[in-house]
Amino acid sequence: MDNTERLLHRFYEPLVLLRVLDPTRGAQNTGMVPDSRSDTSQDLRRKFLDQLSWTCDYKHGGDTVSAIAAEANPQGTIFWLAANVNPRQRVLPHLKWILKQLEDSSSVSEEETEELGNKITARCIEFSKDKVKNYRQRLCFRVRGCVGILANQPDQQGLSHVLLQGPKFLLTAVVADYWYLRCSTS
């Protein structure tokens, strides 16, 4: 068993055990992909807070994980921030900046909304550049592996072969097939 599989087993085994031993904690929220057709306002709030928390996590590995809750009161919404490390120095200013940008954008045009989205995205990428670099390295490693597998396919229709290798290849297989199709048509 390689290091990645060992790490996955270390992560999932306790989760399975907790699920079996303590099913009274309620249903898990697994639908985190926006689906405007079926999302309730509570679903949208939860997704917003989860994604906001994710933007405050700036290093790979769990040391900088954050959680955010929102409390409605007559004076406005209060956001509560919990983090594994002291959030005052780095996370809190970042979060305040994002919330200020969103607050100021309540009555802007569609074009300005797109500009703001790009501005926030660029700022979040810069804020968590170490994590982004780690993701990029891991993705590139997987893509190279998939390209190698696809290159050895006689019919160059290797997507189904790669998918049979396991779920960890799903994203990289799609990227590799896209890359192959794009390169072969140019």
Image: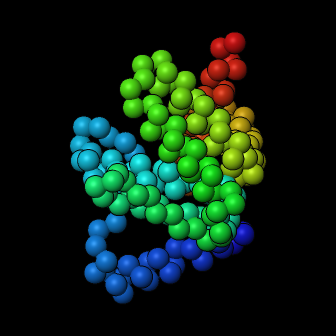
Residue drawn at x 41%, y 61% is 69
Q: Residue 85: horizontal and vertical position, in percent?
A: 65, 70
Residue 109 in view of the camera: yes
Vertical side of 38 occupied by 17: above or below: below
Q: Quadrant of residue 70?
A: bottom left
Image mark count: 0
Identify the coloring.
rainbow
Residue drawn at x 36%, y 87% is 21
In the rendered view, does 41 fall on the left or right side of 172?
Answer: left
Residue drawn at x 50%, y 45% is 99
Placement of the N terminus among the 4 image quadrants:
bottom right
Q: Residue 66: horizontal and vertical position, in percent?
A: 55, 63
Q: Quadrant of residue 178?
A: top right
In the rendered view, does 24 fall on the left or right side of 15?
Answer: left
Q: Residue furthest bottom?
A: 21
Q: Residue 58: horizontal and vertical position, in percent?
A: 67, 55
In the rendered view, does 96 fall on the left or right side of 113?
Answer: right
Q: Nearer the viewer, residue 107 or 14?
A: 107
Q: Nearer the viewer, residue 58 or 36?
A: 58
Q: Nearer the viewer, residue 96 or 183?
A: 96
Q: Residue furthest top?
A: 186
In the rendered view, does 17 fall on the left or right side of 97?
Answer: left
Q: Residue 57: horizontal and vertical position, in percent?
A: 61, 57
Q: Quadrant of residue 63?
A: bottom right
